[in-house]
Image (tube, grey):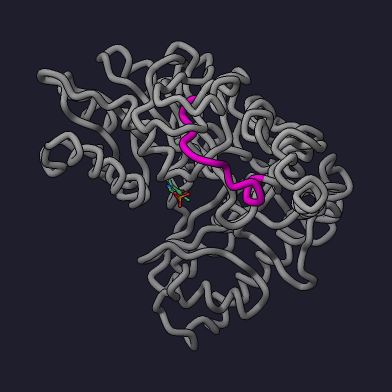
């Protein structure tokens, strides 16, 4: 199907959109086109209400709030883990809401990375987010090794995406653990998680994925695909707010494995308050929690997950793919002539929730967009990311935003903005 890119078409798409009513559940600034839900999702009314509810439970119950109220704090991480499970194709016991990506990665590596004999390396990729790489480096250092030798990274020939052959290169018999993102944060390429896991397992390598850019946007089958572990944050497509608690998945076959980083919130809940100096680990993914959960940074997820349950991840994915296709096709038709290059793969199977565009003046173009009410994000040195959020981006928004971008490129108004990134990009 090809798009017409006119207003009438956008209005028609909005009318046909089964998810259109969810837009009213979110706080959307008048006159703004928010295309940055992949960096920080917007606040929903349900998430706001959930935070208020937990403040009220603190007010009303004091310490009893750990066990009383509609959402007892003591089991909140577990109950939200249960509700997250359908989004990633996991069993309830395999998921826990806790920590942040980097902390959870440290926990998973501390648990799974056991260099032995010849198998001492960790494999990753050269396009991954720096924090993931830092965590891998320190885990190698903690084992007394040199990361320059023990961390190997799949190299991308085109500098933006990875082929299965490029990933195969690092799957050697010296590798203990492979860590990859599900979706590359710059280009938006969705990697073939099932196929990679199969190939790594054939080589005796444990496999972990960072779902930062896929959870809440793309359905997964982590249990069935036998992924060993996964980590994610909830402030991107999950709309859990800035610094909101993240999550981790640990496959059932590994349950009972001693957490590399023990803490009392990983205890068997009935034993936790025995205050014994011997750690009795809890069941399933809950055992990999460390300390007391950040209740107020977890609260928004109560409301947010209700919305996911109502909408269904399959429906959200369908709309997201249609909207990213709209942007991709518009770029091909109207923006290529201005030196804008799409680096996101074209097929649905290889596309996450955002479209990435490359341009030498990307930083100034982003500033020009912001001046016109479009919120994109910029990744140095030359990438513009545009992420429609299926929950709250309307087709009319997309239509108007793309027309504005075209105008900015045609008139070159971006030339009046500096091509330097801001502190937060
Ligand atoms: C957003 C993101 C992070 C951020 O990590 P935090 O520990 O949550 O700050 C890490 N890795 C990837 C791939 C990301 O996209």
User: In front here: 141 or 389?
Assistant: 141
Instruction: Say whether residue 293 is magenta.
Output: yes
Q: Is residue 180 left or right of residue 314?
A: left
User: In front here: 382 or 99?
Assistant: 99
Answer whether residue 326 is visible to the viewer in this image.
Answer: no
Q: Which residues are magenta?
A: 286-298
Which residue lies at the image location 45% right of the left edge and 43% below the top edge? 101
User: In front here: 90 or 184?
Assistant: 90
Q: Where residue 323 sits: x, y (%)?
A: 67, 48
Residue at far bottom of view: 416
Q: Is residue 70 above or below residue 297?
A: above
Q: Where residue 151 sits: x, y (%)?
A: 19, 38
Write down the quadrant of residue 333 in the picture: bottom right
Q: Is residue 251 above or below residue 28?
A: above
Which residue lies at the image location 82% right of the left edge and 42% below the top edge? 19
Q: Where residue 148 sits: x, y (%)?
A: 12, 44
Answer whether residue 141 is visible to the viewer in this image.
Answer: yes
Q: Where residue 233 sits: x, y (%)?
A: 53, 44
Which residue lies at the image location 83% right of the left edge and 43% below the top edge? 17
User: In front here: 308 or 277?
Assistant: 277
Write down the quadrant of residue 74 in the picture: top right
Which residue lies at the image location 25% right of the left edge and 38% below the top edge? 139
């Amino acid at each position: 199907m090809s798009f017409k890119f006119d207003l009438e078409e956008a209005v028609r798409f909005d009318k046909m959109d089964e998810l259109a009513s969810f837009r009213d559940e979110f706080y959307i600034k008048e006159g703004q086109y928010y295309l940055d839900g992949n960096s920080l999702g917007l606040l929903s009314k349900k998430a706001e209400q959930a935070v208020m509810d937990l403040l009220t439970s603190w007010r009303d119950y004091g310490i009893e709030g750990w066990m009383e109220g509609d959402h007892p704090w003591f089991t909140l991480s577990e109950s939200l883990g249960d509700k997250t499970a359908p989004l990633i194709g996991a069993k309830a016991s395999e998921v826990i809401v806790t920590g942040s990506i980097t902390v959870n990665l440290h926990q998973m590596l501390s648990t799974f990375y056991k260099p032995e004999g010849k198998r001492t390396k960790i494999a990753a990729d050269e396009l991954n987010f720096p924090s993931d790489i830092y965590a891998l480096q320190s885990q190698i250092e903690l084992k007394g090794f040199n990361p320059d030798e023990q961390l190997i990274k799949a190299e991308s020939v085109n500098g933006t995406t990875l082929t299965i052959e490029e990933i195969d290169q690092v799957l050697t018999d010296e590798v203990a653990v492979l860590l990859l993102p599900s979706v590359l944060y710059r280009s938006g390429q969705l990697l073939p998680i099932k196929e990679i896991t199969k190939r790594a397992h054939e080589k005796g390598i444990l496999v972990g994925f960072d779902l930062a850019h896929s959870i809440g946007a793309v359905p997964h089958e982590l249990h069935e695909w036998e992924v060993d572990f996964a980590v994610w944050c909830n402030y991107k497509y999950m709309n859990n707010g800035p610094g909101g608690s993240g999550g981790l998945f640990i496959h059932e076959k590994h349950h009972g494995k001693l957490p590399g980083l023990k803490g009392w919130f990983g205890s068997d809940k009935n034993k936790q308050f025995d205050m014994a100096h011997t750690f009795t680990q809890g069941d399933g993914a809950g055992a990999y929690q460390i300390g007391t959960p950040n209740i107020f940074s977890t609260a928004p997820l109560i409301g947010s997950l209700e919305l996911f349950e109502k909408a269904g991840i399959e429906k959200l994915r369908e709309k997201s793919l249609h909207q990213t296709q709209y942007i991709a096709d518009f770029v091909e038709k109207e923006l290529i002539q201005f030196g804008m290059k799409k680096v996101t793969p074209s097929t649905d199977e290889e596309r996450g929730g955002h479209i990435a565009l490359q341009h030498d003046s990307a930083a100034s173009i982003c500033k020009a967009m912001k001046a016109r009410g479009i919120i994109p994000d910029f990744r140095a040195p030359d990438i513009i990311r545009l992420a429609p959020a299926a929950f709250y981006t309307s087709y009319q928004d997309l239509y108007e935003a793309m027309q504005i971008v075209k105008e900015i490129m045609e008139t070159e108004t971006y030339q009046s903005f500096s091509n330097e990134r801001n502190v937060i990009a």
